[in-house]
Amino acid sequence: MLKGFPPIADENTHTLILGSFPGVASLDAAQYYAHPRNQFWRLVGTVIGEPLNELPYDERVLRLLKHGIGLWDVLAACEREGSLDTAIRNANPNDFASFRLHAPRLKKLCFNGKTSGRFEPVIRAAGFETLVLPSSSPANAILSFDQKLRIWRDILGRFKGDWDRVGE
């Protein structure tokens, strides 16, 4: 059984981006979105105006938190050969009910791809604003980076006012 990562969030986190489960490269590096072809850091960095993909991992995380953004996955553990979401078996979800204790300002959950997006109805029913984004994974080659960015900007851009107010 593979185990996922703890959430990255603090008391100022108002938006949480959820993946499905870390891929092999991420598990090996003990970092979210560690695969060099995954577009996550470039996408979210462009949206928030930070060069995240050019920074060391610890600095990326600090910059996300500065903008009120956290990271986690919908799954706490699973069995899987390789990194494809389609290979996930015997999955155990993370405990979102207790997560509110870690991030009391949390309002919005954005799902990075269709697999994590399957949890959207449950999370929305719990009172959160939810959005499903196109996956940043290199396996999602249907959309180009620019096409993904337009969608990530359109969806996340409407939260930018919240990001600008973090720390006020």
Image (cartoon, helix red, strand yellow):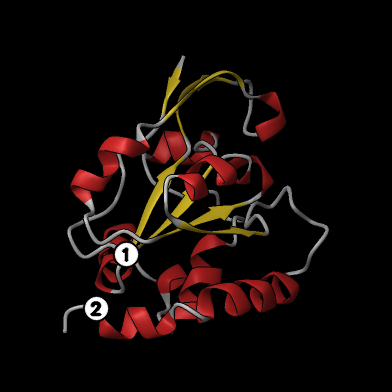
Residue reaching furthest right?
Answer: 142
At label 2, counting other C-alpha atoms closer than 10 Å, the crowd grade (few under 14, some 14-19, many 20 or more) is some
Residue 53: x and y in percent read: 46, 69
At 57% across and 46% down in the image, what residue appears? 120
Image disc number at residue 158: none
Determine whether, in the image, residue 95 is placed left or right of residue 114. Answer: left
Determine whether, in the image, residue 53 is placed left or right of residue 55. Answer: right
Image disc number at residue 166: 2
Q: Is residue 46 visible?
A: no
At label 1, counting other C-alpha atoms closer than 10 Å, the crowd grade (few under 14, some 14-19, many 20 or more) is many
In the rendered image of this protein, does residue 118 appear above or below residue 130?
A: above
Image disc number at residue 14: 1
In terms of sequence position, does the residue under pointer 1 or pointer 2 come before the other? 1
**Residue 166 lies in quadrant:** bottom left
At 68% across and 78% down in the image, what residue appears? 150
**Residue 107 lies in quadrant:** bottom left
Determine whether, in the image, residue 76 is placed left or right of residue 101. Answer: right
Whether label 1 touches label 2, CB < 8 Å? yes
At 29% across and 71% down in the image, what residue appears? 63
